[in-house]
Each structure stands twice: as C-alpha cells, then as structure tokens.
Amino acid sequence: MNKFALTVECKSQPGVVAAIATYLAHNACNITDSAQYDDLENGGFFMRISFTCATEMKMEGLSKGFDQVAQAHQMKFAFHDETKKMKVAIFVSRFGHCLNDILYRWRIGALPIDIVAVISNHDDYQELVQSRNIPFHLIKVTKENKAEAESAQLAIIEETGAELIVLARYMQVLSDQMCQRMSGRIINIHHSFLPSFKGANPYKQAYARGVKLIGATSHYVTSDLDEGPIIEQDIARVTHAQSPNDYVALGRDVESQVLARAIHAHIHHRAFISGNKTIVFPASPDSYASERMG
C-alpha cells in the first residue's frame, strides 16, 4: 500500500478541506493523519495530510489529477512519497557534536535521510565520515577564495541532488547568492536562544548577563545573519555556579536535539515558511519510530 503526504498552502477560504478530502476519497485514498492552520495575521492557510492509497495510483498521477482542485482554490501544493528518503548534505567545521548526533540517528533510522555528502573546511571528521561510507569533501574557505569555495560546494549539491543542506555548526557565513539559491532548503543550528546573544560567543554573552536559561535555535537560513524563520528551540537551566565552559558543555546536548528535531520536521514536510516565521505541524504517528529500536 502506497504511503503519501500532501502539503497545501493557499489563502484561507471556505471549502478547501472539503475539496481536498473529496479528491482523495474519489481516488481510493484513506487519510491517516491531518493537520491544518489558519494564519490570521496574513490570511494564509496551511495543511499537511498523510494518507494511504489502496490502488496502484502513482504520485505523478495524483498530482496531475489534483491540478483542477488546486487551480480552483489557488493552491500551492506538493505530493510526497513518505517512503522516499530526502537527500541531505551536511556542512561542518570543528565542532562535531551535532554531526555525531545526526550520524547516530541516521544509522539507527531515527532520521530517515540519505546523507549524500559531508562538506567541511577542516579535515577533523574526514576519517569518521568515510568510515560510515559517506563521501567527505574538504573545501578550505578563506576571505580570498570564498566565492570559489561556494562554487565548489554548489557543484557537489547539484551533482549529488541534495535537497537539503544542514549546517551542523558550520562556522562560515554563507553568501547572499547561496542563501537565495537554496532558499527554504538550508537549516542552521545556532548556539543561542535567538534573537538574544547573536554572534560567535553567545554563551559568554549569556554568562556575562547572568542568565538562568541557555538555549539553542534551529532556523532556515536567509541573507540576514541568524534572522531566518525559526523551526525549533529548546533550553537548559543554569545557575550562577556554572562557568562559561559549563554553558558550552550543557549547550551541546541542547543544540544536537534541537537540530535533529528541525531536520525531522523538514524531511517529513511538516514545516511551512509563513513570512518571518514557520508553521510546524506535529509529527505523524510512527514517524519517530526507528529501524533499530531498543
């Protein structure tokens, strides 16, 4: 039995849900999970539906047949094969906790992705990555060669067909051109509870302010540094007795978990960009289940 997801964006209007449900029913599809949201601020409507299809109907056929419904309601839509793993490229520098966490979740099936490349400006994790039979690309980045380095990175993205770039503590600022070219397809983890404490040393800034909560933020990358739509956040409690180094150590766990949850939302097509924010629907049943439980 085929398992699909349908994502829809359009203006809020009567009859949208009924039209979608009627179309799926007429094509012998059974809805197994559904989430929807009306964004009252901008009048947008967002919906994600998981469904099974008892017939041999292919995704292309479903999509083509849905055109008439979409045109009637001016919908932006996409059908997704839920059994197909998204191709992901990971960028990393010298902090490896997020990379290691992703590789572990990928290995046990908790993050059902196809890692097609790991790209780094340092060789610290070359042996680790290649031991997992994942292609590793060392591309040095300097002020003088930044444009050439990004061209090489984009060539790898195109060659591998990567659908998502994950910045797993990649400590280089991407150019406006790359951000625009991959708009909505680059996820970053920032070791701060944005919008507070931006920049290279947010934990030191937080320590200097005597905060009692530290956090991490995962967001879509835009041309505005660390200002992209936020997908996921979390926090850890600290006290006056902790040092800046304690903040960093405690923050590593938060960063890894937040980034993994953001990736999970994106690859399951649960995250929608709405202006400067995101709509993130709850996970469907069994989407967190891994191949190697226990």
Image (cartoon, rainbow, N blue to C red):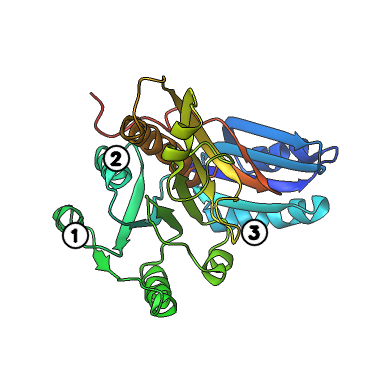
| Position above or below: 105 against 76 | above
The answer to whether 256 is drawn above or below residue 86 in the figure is above
Other-residue count near label 3 (Cα within 10 Å), few / some / many at <14 / 14–19 / ≥20? few
Q: Nearer the viewer, residue 167 or 161?
A: 167
**Rendered image: mark on residue 101:** 2
Q: Residue at x 19, y 59 (%)?
A: 126
Q: Residue at x 36, y 30 (%)?
A: 289
- Residue 113 horizontal/vertical position (percent): 36, 48
Q: Quadrant of the C terminus?
A: top left
Alpha carbon of mark 2 to alpha carbon of mark 1: how far? 16 Å
Would residue 84 be found to the left or right of residue 178 on screen? left
Q: Quick one: 208 or 214, which is closer to the camera?
A: 208
Q: Quadrant of residue 137?
A: bottom left
Q: If you read the primary sequence from the N terminus, does the residue marked by circle 2 or circle 3 appear first?
A: 3
Figure quadrant of residue 121: bottom left
Dot 3 or dot 1: first in sequence order is 3
> Would you call the spot at circle 1 few (<14 residues within 10 Å), some (14-19), or many (20 or more)?
some
Q: Are marks 2 and 3 in contact (CB under 8 Å)?
A: no
**Residue annotated with mark 3:** 64
Q: Amino acid at mark 2?
A: Asp
Which x, y percent locates residue 263?
44, 44
Gap between marks 3 and 1, in whole Å? 44 Å
Label 2: which secondary element: helix
> What's the residue type where badge 1 is placed?
Gln
Q: Tag 1 or tag 2, which sits nearer the N-term?
A: 2
For the residue labelled by badge 1, is the local secondary structure a helix, a strand or a loop?
helix
- Between 115 and 67, the residue placed more toward the observer is 115
Does the residue at mark 3 contact the one at mark 1 (Cβ under 8 Å)? Answer: no
Q: Which mark is residue 106?
A: none
Residue 1, can we see it? no
- Which residue lies under the disc numbered 1? 126
